[in-house]
Amino acid sequence: MSCRSPPPPPDQVVPALARGLHRAARGAVVDLREVRPGAAVEQLYKHWPGTGARLTDSTCMELPTLPFDELVKRMPASGAQRVRAKLRKTDAVGIEEHEVTEQEVPRAVRTLLRLHEKQWRGRGVTPEHLRPRFAEHLTRAVRRMVRAGEGRLTEFRLDGKVVASNVTLLSAGLSGGYLYGADPELRARKVDVATLLLRHEAGRALADGRPVVSFLRGDEPYKNHWRPETVVNRRFLLATNALAPLLRLHESQLAGRERAVDALREALPAARDWRARLGELRVR
């Protein structure tokens, strides 16, 4: 006979979580980042017994899950025509898709990161993506997410060779492309990798019943071709009342950092133009 207590009623789960987290975080400020509107953290914040603050976090661009032809129709007519032409060239190449199994993840992550480095070589790759600790983290995380149905790693193969690879994060509400790598030689074959990946993700999201396809963080201009909807994530800071001064200090530091970033953006318009042109190249 089980001695476990019955689970609390649904309306008591969040208050109980808030109380438990409050006890566990006696000497720390809890910093919850990238909270999407409607997430459970919003309810946690309402029931928090201490002090807290809400800040804005990253801007995300999202598309409703529709048949890909319908997504193309959202674009200006000239852009839609270019996308259809690119897809005809891509389909003529004969790329095949393969969804990686949990057992294949270690090998597939190595391939993805190799392609990612090759794709960004000479163009300012994120240094963290090249470090062994990132490869180890990504391998552990992707294996667990694939096992739990919370992530997917898809390989795109040409003549048996992996030429592109993409990690997708999954939830009940959305699918979002997290990290991909692609062989630069695909450009010579007239393959538009960004459009190839988006068509794949839109099709899978539609088949799986997920309502949103997200570009995740970033409002780069090239994403606007698809006329996405803008969603601003939130950042929640939580602490006990005794740590209110520490929380306010942390909040002011974050606000100051954001002002510095905004000032840098205003002072370096050439950098913004460079990033915009780079984004345009990705979708051509």
Image (cartoon, helix red, strand yellow):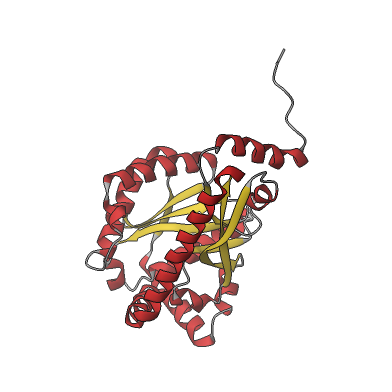
**Which x, y percent locates residue 98?**
42, 51
Residue at image position (45%, 70%) is 259
x then y, percent, for residue 222: 44, 76
Q: Tell me: 4 left or right of 127.
A: right
Q: Quadrant of the N terminus?
A: top right
Q: Using the rendered image of the protein, determine whether residue 277 is visible from the camera's viewpoint.
A: yes
Q: How many marks?
A: 0
Residue at (25, 60) in percent of width and height? 118
Of the 4 image quadrants, the one containing the C terminus is: bottom left
Percent coordinates x, y for residue 200 in the rendering: 49, 61
Asked where in the image residue 82 lies, by quadrant, the reply is: bottom left
Residue 160 seen in this snapshot: no
Q: Which residue is painted at 43% across and 43% down in the image? A: 141
Question: With respect to residue 66, does 7 lie above or below?
Answer: above
Q: Is residue 272 left or right of residue 206?
A: left
Q: Is residue 60 above or below residue 136?
A: below
Left/right placement of residue 74 relative to residue 5 reads: left
